[in-house]
Image (cartoon, grey):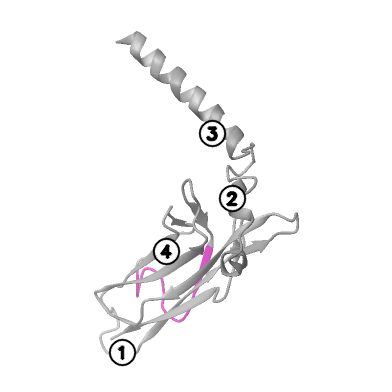
């Protein structure tokens, strides 16, 4: 059995090195790709090319936007949807965000933790689990605003923030 594991590991290394030369991969501090695969950077489709943003180093980055799924009643779970165009071919990325609004974390909803993960599909979600209203006399709606923040390996598109209301 040990011999089979050694052969399998050797095959994986050979395959990894062969693929690395094909896609022109190289190491990068944040672990992301250093450049696009050869057939993705040159395209006649201008819409595909416009999905990338050029960083200060001249590197093409996927663009991330955010949208709310709408207002939610107390006791329910709502979400913000993250959309990355184009999606990363091999894995996803983490996107930093900040939270503001009139709703209070821990009182109106379960506190949100940054960063959020966007998967290989190009989509990610930030779930907002609302809590029962401790202010029984107050029948007011409260807002939750999520704003995307700049980070490594992606660029921000429009809209870069979204809002939802927690309804009584």
Q: Which residue is mark 2?
A: 39
Residue 49 visible at all: yes
Identified at 42% across, 64% down, the residue is 112
Q: Which residue is mark 1?
A: 138
The C terminus is located in which quarter?
A: bottom left
Find the distance from the CA under tag 2 to the CA under tag 3.
14 Å
Is 60 a magenta residue? no
* Mark 1 → mark 4, Cα distance in angstroms: 24 Å
In the image, taking residue 144 as reference, residue 20 lies left or right, namely right
Magenta residues span 97-109
**Mark 4–mark 3 distance (CA, rounded to whole Å):** 38 Å
- Within the magenta stretch, is there residue 100? yes
Going by the image, does 165 lie left or right of 162? left
Is disc 4 surrounded by few (<14), some (14 to 19) or many (20+) residues within 10 Å? some
* Residue carrying label 3: 19
Regarding mark 3 in the picture, which secondary structure is present there?
Answer: helix
User: Mark 4 vs mark 3: which is more N-terminal?
Assistant: 3
Give residue 29's position: percent from left, percent from top. 64, 41
In primary-sequence order, the first of circles 3 and 1 is 3
- Check residue 112 in the rendering and tell me which mark sits there, or answer none: 4
Query: Please, what secondary structure does the residue beneath circle 1 have?
Result: loop
């Amino acid at each position: 059995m040990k011999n089979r594991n050694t052969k399998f590991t050797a095959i994986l290394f050979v395959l990894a090195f062969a693929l690395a030369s094909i896609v022109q991969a190289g190491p990068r501090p944040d672990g992301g790709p250093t450049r696009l695969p050869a057939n993705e950077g040159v395209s006649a489709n201008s819409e595909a090319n416009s999905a990338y943003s050029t960083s200060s180093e001249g590197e093409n980055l996927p663009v991330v936007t955010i949208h709310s799924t709408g207002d939610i009643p107390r006791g329910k779970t709502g979400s913000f949807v993250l959309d990355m165009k184009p999606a990363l071919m091999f894995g996803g990325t983490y996107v930093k965000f900040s939270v503001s609004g009139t709703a209070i974390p821990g009182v109106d909803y379960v506190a949100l933790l940054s960063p959020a993960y966007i998967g290989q599909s190009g989509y990610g979600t930030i779930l907002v689990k609302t809590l029962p209203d401790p202010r029984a006399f107050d029948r007011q709606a409260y807002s939750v605003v999520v704003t995307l923040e700049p980070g490594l390996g992606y660029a921000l598109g429009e809209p870069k923030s979204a809002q939802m209301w927690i309804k009584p």
